[in-house]
Amino acid sequence: MKSVVKQEVLALNGDEAVAYAVKQSDVDVVAAYPITPQTIIVEKFSEYVANGEVETEFVCTESEHSALTACLAASATGARAFTASASAGLALMHEMLFVTSGCRAPVVMAIANRALSAPLNIHGDHSDTMAQRDSGWIQMYVENAQEAYDSIIQAFRIAENLHVLLPVIVGLDGFTLSHTLENVQTLSDEAVKKFVGTRQFPKVMSHEGKTVPFRLDPENPMSMGPIALPNYYFEFKRQQEEAMRNALSVIQHVNEEFGKISGRSYGDGLLDPYMLDDAEIAVVCLGSTAGTVKAVVNELRADGVKAGVLRMRTFRPLPVDGIVDALRKVKAVAVMDRSMSFGGSGGPVFHEVRHALYDLPAHPYIVNYIYGLGGRDTSPTQIRQIFEDLRGIVQTKRVESSVKYVGLRE
């Protein structure tokens, strides 16, 4: 796909790529608290503010809980809001994650994915965002710094779509992406501003009987996120689920539209398959790991092995139909999880993929590989062994153990 607009190549790490995308997205309020490996994002953005390169109100709060609260309040008044966090910072936001999605506030947040304590670890895995997967936020995971830049820009369009109005998390692997320098093709400020557009608001009926934009405004008083007792609360939650369903097509459309101006798209925006058309064995994974898996697939293909990869770009909403279509003809699937669901007999991505395939008349053998916790490296040799395991499963038609651990001393 060829770009229709002129682009400039910048050397940026993943955090800087996020900050640059936010700089270009006409954001009104950024509220944040520093935490490794996210700090570079808000540190870099604060430089843009100090240098007068943006008109954004930057609020350095006393905690991550306060940071998201400030973004929620700003978004509720009609501002475009952004924050960033990781690990314990995201965990501290836990209460406000639910409040933000429940208020239908389209806040965008970048997460430099990092392990959770204890013991203390500052390196990358997906434990932080997976612990928040049912908080009502859209979740997208990127493979490289380029996609981090592109996805932040897309996230504002997705979140603010009137059929969605949900907050969005864009996850990039801590240190592997957040601190690694890459060439990033950047659009012009004008092109990004045009693509993101001006925030629109649904019209609602106020208590005064007037039809007004859905935002807090002293001229048109209304309540947002009020108390809802048993006779109404359920309906609010059902509306959030409908918004998640709507997001599936919106994410696809935004990915396609972005591809028209940038020359870059990521599968259909939900799933990014690689060599899957005739694959007999496949790996499902999220984030930067996909790049390594693709390299191994290339080697296997050269050896005549029909291997493939399904990278899940969007984890919430879960693209069930797409997962089924992509994997229905595969004989054996390995699902890689960079987090654990303690006592849950497998990781969260494994649970979701297995669930999606359950109703197929004949579904592939499925095995789970837990890997990379606390930033532990996962080598091409180890990934190649996963594919060898799948070949053995196809030959024996038997799964010895449904949950395995990669590179673990036991």
Image (cartoon, rainbow, N blue to C red):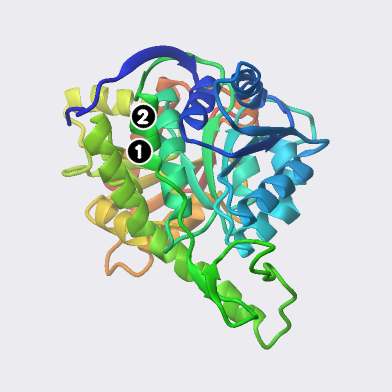
Relative image position of residue 332 (x, y in whole percent): 32, 48
Say if residue 303 shows up in the picture: no
Say if residue 339 shows up in the picture: yes
Relative image position of residue 389 (x, y in whole percent): 38, 37
Badge 2: residue crowd in 10 Å (few <14, some 14–19, many ≥20):
few
Residue at the spot x=79%, y=36% of the render? Answer: 61
Specify the amino acid type for callout 2.
Glu
Q: Are marks 2 and 1 in contact (CB under 8 Å)?
A: yes
Relative image position of residue 60 (x, y in whole percent): 76, 31
Q: Which residue is mark 2?
A: 190
Specify the amino acid type for callout 1.
Lys
Q: Quadrant of residue 233?
A: bottom right
Q: Quadrant of residue 274?
A: top left
Badge 1: residue crowd in 10 Å (few <14, some 14–19, many ≥20):
few
Q: Which residue is mark 1?
A: 194
Relative image position of residue 287 (x, y in whole percent): 46, 34
Q: Is residue 382 left or right of residue 308?
A: right
